[in-house]
Amino acid sequence: KTKEPRTSRRTSKEERRIMLWYKSWLDTRRWFFLGMCMLAAQALALYVSYPMDPVTSFPNGALGVLPDEMAQLRTGDFRGYIWLRWFSTTMLLFWPVFVIALAGTGLESRAGREYLLSLPFTRRRIVLTRLWVVFAQIAAFTVLPSLLVCALAPLVGQRYPVGDALVHSLI
């Protein structure tokens, strides 16, 4: 009997890993695309409502802004507007909902759980792969809509630095 070369065995193992990543992607893609579309729509709404008077829109402050900081944001500065409307309100409301949705999808039905556990992987490998896929999606729907905010700023005659958007997205 002849043995198969080691490379074919390795390829088979790599293919199984890729399929596990792909299954994790398939389980979470609906929520990911829904979150991306909703945040993109919110980015468009952000510019439709510009300029906004923060005194009338947020008379008692905002979610992620302390009362002392609110006075500084009411100056009418475009960067303050973006921080107030996008990072401290929209992202704070949407982010936790979609993080929980991404982390829990694909495990709702009994058949989905049974199929997942019947795969030739350890539970640890399944969970770690799922976490990496979800972390990558969370990073993407945190950063990409914020970059869209930067790209749309010239439509209202303003400029929002990409560096600021990236730093605020990491916060």
Image: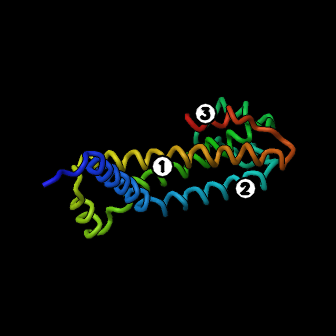
Q: Nearer the viewer, residue 71 or 4?
A: 4
Dot 3: few (<14), some (14–19), or many (≥20) neighbours within 10 Å? few
Question: Where does the image place residue 3, in percent across and percent down from the top left?
Answer: 18, 51
**Which mark is drawn over residue 96?**
1
Residue drawn 66% across and 37% down? 165
Residue assigned mark 2 = 44
Instruction: Look at the picture and state if 137 lies above or below 28.
Output: above
**Which mark is drawn over residue 135?**
none
Q: Which badge, 1 or 2, comes first in the chain's sequence?
A: 2
Dot 1: few (<14), some (14–19), or many (≥20) neighbours within 10 Å? few
Q: Nearer the viewer, residue 69 or 113?
A: 113
Q: Nearer the viewer, mark 1 or mark 2?
A: 2
Real-space Cα separation, disc 1 to disc 2, in angstroms: 21 Å
Instruction: Look at the picture and state if 113 lies above or below 135.
Output: below
- Residue 72 quadrant: top right
> Marks 3 and 1: in contact by CB < 8 Å?
no
Q: How many marks?
A: 3
Residue drawn 80% across and 35% down? 77
* Quadrant of image for the C terminus: top right
